[in-house]
Amino acid sequence: MSSNQSNTQNGSEQKKNVTDSTQTSLSKKTEITIPEFESSIVNQLVTKFTDKIVQVVYVRPGRTKILVPPNEIVHVATFIRDTLGFDHAESVSGTDYPKDNQIEVIYHLSSYSDEKLSSHVLALSTRVDRNDSRLPTLIDIFKSAEYHERETFEMLGVYFEGHPRNERFLLPEDWADIPPLRKEFRIKGR
Amino acid sequence: MENFEQKFDETIKRGLEIVKETEEDRLMTLSVGPQHPGSGHFRFTIKVDGDYIVYCDPDPGYVHRGEEKMCEYRNFIQNIPHLERPVIHDSTNITYSYSLAVEELTNIQVPLRGQYIRALASELNRQVYTLYWLGIYGIFLGHSTMFMWPVGDRELFIDLLEALTGARVTHAFNIPGGVRNDMPEGFKDRCLRQVAYFEKRLVEYEDIFYNNPLFRQRTEGVGILTKEDAIKLGVTGSVLRASGIPFDVRKAEPYDVYEEIDFKIQYMKTCDSYARSMVPFLDMKESCHIIRELLDKMPQSGEVRAKLQPNPKGPAGESYKRVESGRGALGYYIVSDGTPKPYRVKLSVGSFRNMLALPFLLIGSKLADMPSIYWSLNYWPVEADR
């Protein structure tokens, strides 16, 4: 099913780029080709920032993910907004990796103003040290990240420098435990 | 019109002010909620200067259940029943994108008839949700007929879904690989009959509610969210479409069979509370067409779900899938480490994203406009809290 759907998206993407073989890509169910439009976005990023800064994690139809170091995330995000045209954050989430001693923070960015990008979600991710998890906030670039970052702060303990409110949001007021989405937090009895 | 950045920073600053409790005597602090005076287990603190709201600070979390943490303890299939709890009225849509994401991770193909049935179930469920929302919207604007009618007509769709899924509200119908069971005998005719009846009712809704001069007075020109602001705030669903942006995930990124379905994105350009309450209504009308078209194009027989392994798992990887729910784009970000249990599940829900617009719109508006702005945001507190 998944590749079927991915190819369907691929088909619609290619229609916009006025390339042929929409039908053939629909009929091929298992094979996923690297889509042109998506790779052009990634290429722009890599050309601008070099592959030392922007690591491409994957390029799939409609989805791309890049990994950048924390100190460069503001520059990359500004470029993504101003040049590539992604204008809002759909979600900001964090994943805890105790084995690597890192927390990955990932911004899912999308666009309303550019119709070509509407089927596309760009995942901008960065990894911070678990013991000193500080990140510059992206609230000045994507205002829509405000509550999402605040949630990430309380759920994973990632402090967003420059965010006006790194404080409790969804959890109880008297919450006095470690951030619950860290892996060492266990649900009682499990 | 002051510029967006200034207004946004001011909104945050005023939210902080509320916490500090340093008001002058003339300002009165009001706590709206969480005991359901029209907010639905959600609290926001406002300060009023005479008739006008000058500070606003949303305080969600009264119904936070820790869905994302719970997901890490259960396998992909066990997660379905508890994941629909955030919006039981829209339970098919909230499990829809979860199923899509798990299908991508575990590489499951859904049979065509299964795709049609779950699109049908999600359209019916969207009607159920929107009618419920409309009922509450009506009662909190003091229009009790608009509470009785939608809640009564909602039963039609609940009965249809009961026949289809076996449960009235919490269906757990979507599963990775398709739907749990096939349509019952004679379902198509029954569905068409009730949709035809419902379309007649929609005309009456428009007459009694949307064309009601009192309702229009209270909502027209109230809580203006301009197109540019809507984009920057990243709102979604009916709130976004009411600000003149024709964005619908079903069109922008068609999933399952939506690419085959011919429908229009309903949007309005007036950007006010009236537009935000009208767009879900127009969506309901459009949904009736979609239901008819789905029933028409559906293959008459065939499998409805793929055969699953007892404990499905795929290679390590991640997936982000979104669908259009009653409240806007609903995305799941799932990270899998190759075991049958997800490593991390994140729900990006429409209510949480639309909440950002609440203080933004309330500051500067009259206290009397608060209900019409709050409910027009199509906000479901339980979903925002997860």
Image: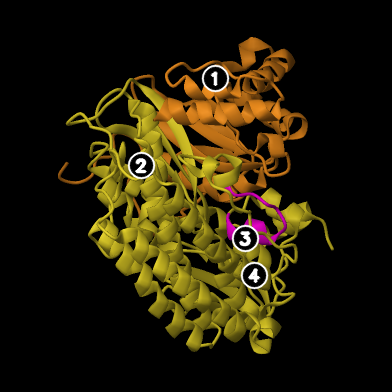
**Mark 1 is on which residue type?**
Thr
Q: Is residue B11 left or right of residue A62?
A: right
Q: What hue represents chain B?
A: yellow
Whether residue B245 is situated above or below residue B162 in the rendered picture: above
Do marks 4 and 3 share a chain? yes
| Quadrant assignment, res B328 | bottom right
The residue under the point 50% across, 78% down is: B201
Mark number displayed over residue B239:
3
Mark number displayed over residue B275:
none
Do marks 1 and 2 share a chain? no
The residue under the point 32% across, 24% down is: B337
Alpha carbon of mark 4 to alpha carbon of mark 3: how far? 22 Å
**Between disc 4 and disc 3, whose residue precedes?**
4
Q: Which residue is mark 2?
A: B113
Q: Which residue is mark 4?
A: B55
Q: Is residue B26 visible?
A: no
**Mark 2 is on which residue type?**
Arg
**Mark 3 is on which residue type?**
Val
What is the span of residues highlighted in magenta in the rendered image?
Answer: B237-248
**Chain containing the residue with disc 3:** B
Q: Is residue B240 magenta?
A: yes
**Residue A25: x and y, percent?**
54, 21
Q: Is residue B120 visible?
A: yes
Farthest residue in the left direction?
A189
